[in-house]
Amino acid sequence: MKRIELYENKIHMLWEVTDAGEIKLLHFSALPFEEDTLTSKTGTQSFYPVEILVSGQDRVGERHGHKYIQTSPGYRMKYREFRDFRNERGRKLEVVTEDHITGLDVTSHYQFYDGISVVRAWTEVRNRGTEPQGLEYVSSFALNGIEKEGLREFDEKLELRIPHNAWQKELDWASYTLRELGLSSTQPHSMHRSSKTIGIGNTGNWSAKEYIPMGYLENQETRSSLFWQIEHNGSWYWEISDQDGHVYLKLSGPTEHHNHWWKNLQPGETFLTVPVSVGTAEGGFDEAMGELTKYRRAIRRVNDDNENLKVIFNDYMNCLFGDPTTEKEIPLIDKAAEAGCEYFCIDAGWYSAGYWWDGVGEWLPSKERFPGGIKEVTDYIRAKGMIPGVWLELEVMGIKCPKADRVKDDWYFMRHGKRVYDRSRYQLDFRNPQVRAHATEVIDRVVNEYGVGYIKMDYNIEPGIGTEVDADSYGDGLLGHNRAYLEWLDGIFEKYPDLIIENCSSGGLRMDYAMLSRYSIQSTSDQEDYVRYATITANAPSAVTPEQAAVWSYPLTDGDCEEVIFNMVNALLLRIHQSGHLVNLSPERFNYVKEAITYYKTIRPLTKKALPYWPLGLSAYGDPWVSLGLEAEAKDFLAVWRRDSQSPVQEIPVKHLKGKDVQAVCAYPENVECAYHWNKEAGTLTVELPARVSARIFELRY
């Protein structure tokens, strides 16, 4: 037996190669390894670094139920090689194992990023045998012993935070003990095992329709954390459960049992799992999300948009609501330019004279809406000093689109010999080169003929488990489509490097870093209540970097000054998605919009590098007070919202500034009633907001 121990970017890892020729991952933590934390009666037996389940293989031993433990041939993989080297990103580990019965070779990849306490992991499976092997499950990352540190029982000391997500209910984090989720400690300490799992996942093309593909686990006894995200735009799954006296975490893309995915791996073929990232930190949620924010910046496509953070006006929310015309757009364009916006996006409806939902697909401008042509409007936008944009939804074709029945069925998702419908639309299959050519032709036309430099790429259907066309399973077809779409998107950005494309899926229903490593900007919600939007704003940096998180600001026609200010504060620390009937605002209220955008342009060089924190904790939709902080260079930015609180006064703790001399300034708006005081020894900012619904931006300078 030998061990391989390493310490990289504040991550401790320990591997063990057994006398039986197996390799085990014993430790992955911000804390050093302690031998006496290995308490299982079976020793390190179940600390497999990868789980693989193949059809026709016997799963021996454990009561596994639906758990991905004691997978076969996962449990009998033999160690062959450990590679440790550096590349342009940082340190790289590759662990190679093999199974002589099936002929499967597995390489477990672990990519470090210099200075960041996060590892990207994925698994490569190659069939070197003579027979096909049916893959039912392959983990991207597997770790047992996530509860090891500390003395208390795991169901007491481990707090799991789950990011619930839904349309207009995005980023609704909730915290649980493992006991509250049904994973109680009921057996002797050295043998914890059960058939219970905490399983979170997604099946389908809306990757975040119920949960953001990420999670956070904190050992409250040791104040250390484990956190992760699954970087996939389709089906995925993660689970936590107990095995052999310990608690494990396993992350993957689609599986057969949960997601209808099965891959018949032919001799000579290789399969790659979806990538995941796993990090660990000392401290709490803020420290973990700081590391994840740095990692997200490191893996995304280099682009000017995330450097410049331009202000976008979009005519949809609380404005035209999908009913644009030349007559309506011209005065809006004038006011958006006057307010200081730098992009102007014509949203849905520009391609149809009337009801357009089930007729989308050709993306040709409506002559009724734009008698002088859409280019007349886009040219006017440019003449006003802004870059024009349009709304598209290229992954679907409406059932009443003239082109829909002129193409073959293999353009679409198919199940049981029938086209897959959802909300009167078909799902296009991007594995088909003709589909990709169709989508590219639309991009070429709007960019080269209409002069568009911004695209709001929406996606409003859920086609379900996948497609049977040219696939081993429905989920296999879906995974192929997901990857083909990303490859197509990479080609579009290579062709048009200055084009900005927003990731929108009924708001934030595909908030994942398969998409966001390409797209520079993410729609956070379709939330129409600006007061509730404060929760989405405050929580957004947990899932998206601040400079990628687009937040609607839509002053109401019949609102007051505090309503305008609240709307603008919603967006100021992230990305401004300006909307609302600006033409209808009084001069006083419109000036608050202008002041906010002017202020935003002064702080965006700092906020694009800042790290988020949550002084009052993550926000719930019913919270009377909400706060989001960004820690930048020599100053912090602090957004504070009062939402019908009984008290006008709130103390905002800023723990990392405790004991420091800080100059507190109400930065937006400058000349509106607001009392505040920095308490040096307590490390708190006391704020008084007289209006029951109001908000402010503070700067804490030091």
Image (cartoon, rainbow, N blue to C red):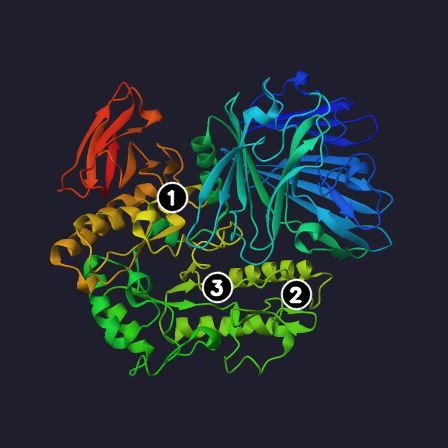
Above or below: residue 430 compared with residue 569: below
Q: Is residue 553 visible?
A: yes
Q: Amino acid at mark 1?
A: Tyr
The residue that label 3 is drawn on is 460
269 displayed left or right of 209: right
Which is nearer the N-term, disc 3 or disc 1? 3
Crowding around mark 2 (Cα neighbors within 10 Å: few <14, some 14 to 19, many 20+) is many
Residue found 26% across the figure and 41% down from its top: 644
Mark 3 vs mark 1, CA separation in Å: 24 Å
The residue that label 2 is drawn on is 467
Q: In this rendering, which labeled residue sits more in front, label 2 or label 1? A: 1
Quarter of the picture containing the N terminus is top right
Query: Which element carries disc 1, helix, strand or loop?
Result: loop
- Kindly check if marks 3 and 1 are in contact, taking CB atoms under 8 A apart as contact: no
Which is nearer the N-term, disc 2 or disc 1? 2
Query: Which element carries disc 2, helix, strand or loop?
Result: loop
Mark 2 vs mark 1, CA separation in Å: 37 Å
Q: Amino acid at mark 2?
A: Thr
Q: In this rendering, which labeled residue sits more in front, label 3 or label 1? A: 1
Residue found 59% across the figure and 57% down from its top: 204
- Kindly check if marks 2 and 3 are in contact, taking CB atoms under 8 A apart as contact: no
Q: Amino acid at mark 3?
A: Asn
Crowding around mark 1 (Cα neighbors within 10 Å: few <14, some 14 to 19, many 20+) is some
Residue nearest the viewer, comparing 349 with 379: 349
The residue that label 1 is drawn on is 621
